[in-house]
Amino acid sequence: MFYSLVLLPMVGALLAWFIPSNRHRPLVLPVFAVLHLTLVADALISTPLPSPDGWINLDPIGKLFLGTITILFAVCAFYAIGYLAYRQERSNRVLCMGLLVCLSAMTLVTVSHHLGLLWVALETTTLAMAPLIYFNRNARSIEATWKYMLICSVGIALALLGLFFLAYSTIVAHQEATLLLEPLIASADRLSPAWLNAAFVFLLVGFGTKMGLAPLHTWKPDAYGEAPGLVGALLAGGLVNCAFLAIIRIYQICMRANDTVFYHNAMIVMGLVSMAFAAVFVVRQADFKRMLAYSSVEHVGILAIALGIGGDALFGALFHVINNGLTKGVLFLSSGNIHRAYGSKNCELVKGALQRVPWSAGLFLAGFIAITGSPPFSPFLSEFSIISSIFGQGKMLIGTLFLLFLAIIFFGMASSVLPVVMGKTSPAVVKSNYRDRLLTVAPPLFLMGIILMLGLWLPAPLKELLQQSAQLLEVRR
């Protein structure tokens, strides 16, 4: 089962390479996305046995991330058909292949219980995503691609050094060197504290770079701003979640150590710094896709704070993984449509999108309302759960800063989003024939429906999965 989950998208990537037609090649994406989704659904229901060597396993946390990533990819795959129909002037071979390779690598991240294998899978996502960011092939996109590659590669290198330190901490403790998750969790209280702390710092900085935690986020605005909308959706809702899962795996080990205060404080500090950076740079942001990048920095900060707080905030953090990932899908797909209709991402030029692309503009507005934590959408519930836990533990300063940054970001995003959606169209805008079509509107509309549904009703199986996942992250000695 596990091998099928990982290898099926690779088969699709090979098939995409050999299909000569630019018109027919994108059909590979939804076909293999649906097949992969079917396998994932079976795995979520049946829970396949782990591999004999313990390297591959699907625990409740892995199920949560795998389900979120698979749904997001399937939606983007159908969107790609409509999007690429407007981009016939450019070969889509590399894009189709890269998307499927990325799906394979992200799947491997979710089922990896060997930290070395997880590192390899994350590095594969870095390499697979680079040519997708460069899809538009202009000076800005090549700059964004190089910045993404260089900064993320440095982060991945630091994470590798952290894994060396983690393995060495077992040797210092006179144990067999291993990077298997379960043995490390079981022996965490016997690992060398100094080497475990060093490993945590390097792994947090390394994987935090890939996740986009400030001040390691500098690749995000360029990459998100220059990548096609569907690639931005997978960056914000897929790759970010994979990096966060890597941090969660390290967190699971550290929470079994003798002293967890250092780890909690480090997560909280990085989370608050990320929210502060987002609050500063999102205000009066002239590029609405770069604005979404800073929104992503905000939300990875929220996730980091929730891990640092622990307790009931863990449920909120895991629920927010779903909510943030799917809502970012809505925002990037709809903003991509608006960009295509106006030929610009400049908020001063793009105004009154409701008149030109009403469905996309409406989804962009709804996505903004959702991502800023407004009811009745599901991000409100996950953020409220985290905030309640912060104040419930008496951490008044952290809670106050959290709410302050949320308020600044809300008004900052509103000052950009509202004119784009409802302002008066500028005569300087280049006319475009692009209009809303079924395959470019239905996918983000489907995601928006899920976000609204989860805000009104949380299915019992999903709630149980979230509770099981949160229990795996609790401090136990």
Image (spheres, rainbow, N blue to C red):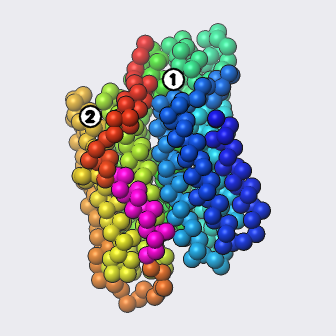
Q: Quick one: 254 or 11, which is closer to the camera? A: 11
Q: What stretch is highlighted in magenta?
A: 436-451
**Circle 2 residues within 10 Å: few <14, some 14–19, many ≥20:** many
Residue 94 picture location, percent across and down: 69, 63
Which label number is shown at residue 390? 2
Give, as a three-letter code, the residue at label 1: Ile
441 part of magenta stretch? yes
Mark closer to the chain start, 1 or 2? 1
Regarding residue 290, the answer to whether it shows in the image is: no
Instruction: Give the vertical position of 112 relative to 435 (above or below).
Output: above
What residue is drawn where x is 32% and y is 27%? 311
Query: In the rendered view, does 298 fall on the left or right side of 224?
Result: left
Under tag 2, what secondary structure? helix
Give, as a three-letter code, the residue at label 2: Ile
Query: In the rendered view, does 108 fall on the left or right side of 246?
Result: right
Residue 333 picture location, percent across and down: 46, 64
Cα distance between the residues tagged 1 and 2: 23 Å
What residue is drawn where x is 60% and y is 62%? 133
Quadrant of image for the N terminus:
top right
Under tag 1, what secondary structure? helix
119 part of magenta stretch? no
What residue is drawn where x is 56% and y is 59%? 77
Q: Quadrant of residue 306?
A: top left
Q: Is the magenta stretch mostly helix, strand or loop?
A: helix
- Read off the residue under disc 1: 253
Query: In the rendered view, does 234 fall on the left or right side of 372?
Result: right
